[in-house]
Image (cartoon, grey):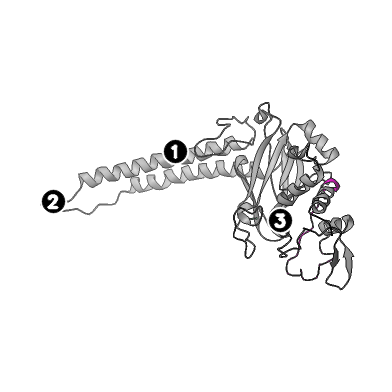
Amino acid sequence: MNDTPVFNAPNGTLQLPPQMSTLAPHVDWLYYLVFWCSVASFVAIVGLMTIYIIKYRRRPGRKSLPTGHNTPLEIAWTVIPLILLMGLFHLGFKNYMSGLVAPKDALQIHVRAMQWNWEFEHPNGTTQMNEAMLPVGVPIQFIISSSDVLHSFYVPEARLKRDAVPGLYTTLWFEVPKERLQGKKDVDVWVFCAEYCGAPHGITNGSEANTNHSTMRAQLHFVPQSVYDDFLKKGPPPPPECEGKPNVASCWGEQIYEQAGCRACHHTDGVTEQPGPNWKGLFGHNVKFEDGTSQVADANYIRQSILQPQAKIVAGYTTINMPPYRLSDREIDAVVAYIKSLGEQ
Ligand code: CUA
């Protein structure tokens, strides 16, 4: 984008969500150009049709005459739309390239799609699940990949979408202008999955978090650069909702359980044992593995199960392969505290 973007509708319009990227005003301008051209054509075509239907309606004693050939008219209705469409293609292609080719100094964030989560990795290796803290006023390039099936990284407020393809990197970039903060601490931008990527067998309850395509979404929290730098240094902090709770770590662990997608497979009711082992009473319990060995479920066991889920398969749980979850040490501690809070044996 060479020209300065103008924020025509920072809060969105009837048809479009808020403009949260420097690209958005350009896309919207083109969208409304196409929209109003379509409205004009619709009115012209339907209007003329109506007039002609009335004017040339069948009347007794009048015979219809076949219409002749009109070369200038035919050339006009071929060439004018051609010029119009080439113009639209040029503008659309320009916008497409703008969203594809990132500036050299862009901050690179890896995005890994998996059933049914979005994992974000920052340049220093910090990872976040289904949410990411990112700076405003900086071009951010998302390097997208998939660990299992086709997904699609869709950010409506940035007006961008790119497929996450197994075995292939795809990219897109955008910048949230500083003005979008409007004096607030942070501003959120939603990510959705726009490629049907399945639903687990037997789970039909739509209220379950991150258990299928339709709930596979993430929230990007855009903050000032200084806040982002601080976050990179210390890792994600416990959520504000858990501050002041008697057990901050287990409260945070329960949130991770919900948000990172653990609950898609692990129940905590002490009853349901599939598809993943139940967490209630797991801590301190002697766990038997597929290979015949066993181990007491302590903090180290839980840590390994999160980072290398395939290292030890609990007997009877071979049907579903859990992907590794790259949680930070603080987050793993929180999950351990949560499992511990569900009761020991
Ligand atoms: Cu991932 Cu739909």
Q: Is residue 202 left or right of residue 288?
A: left
Q: Residue at x 63, y 59 (%)?
A: 197
Q: Label 3, on which residue?
A: 263
The image position of residue 80, as x and y in percent, is: 42, 43
Q: Mark 3 falls on what kind of element?
A: helix
Q: Is residue 167 inside the magenta stretch?
A: no
Amino acid under label 2? Answer: Arg
Q: Is residue 141 above or below residue 315?
A: above
Q: Is residue 330 above or below residue 266?
A: above
Cα distance in 3D space between marks 2 and 3: 76 Å
Q: Residue at x 75, y 37 (%)?
A: 240
- Determine the residue located farthest toward the top in the rendered image: 183
How many other residues sit within 10 Å of disc 2, few (<14), some (14-19) or many (≥20)? few
Q: Mark 1 falls on what kind of element?
A: helix
The image position of residue 239, as x and y in percent, is: 76, 40
Asked whether 191 or 201 is in front, the reply is 201
How many other residues sit within 10 Å of disc 3, few (<14), some (14-19) or many (≥20)? many
Asked whether 143 or 212 is in front, the reply is 212
User: Which marked residue is nearer to the observer: mark 1 or mark 2?
Assistant: 1
The image quadrant that residue 19 belongs to is: top right
The image position of residue 270, as x and y in percent, is: 74, 60
Q: Label 1, on which residue?
A: 36
From this viewpoint, is residue 16 visible? yes
Q: Is residue 235 left or right of residue 83?
A: right
Chain part drawn in magenta: 310-330
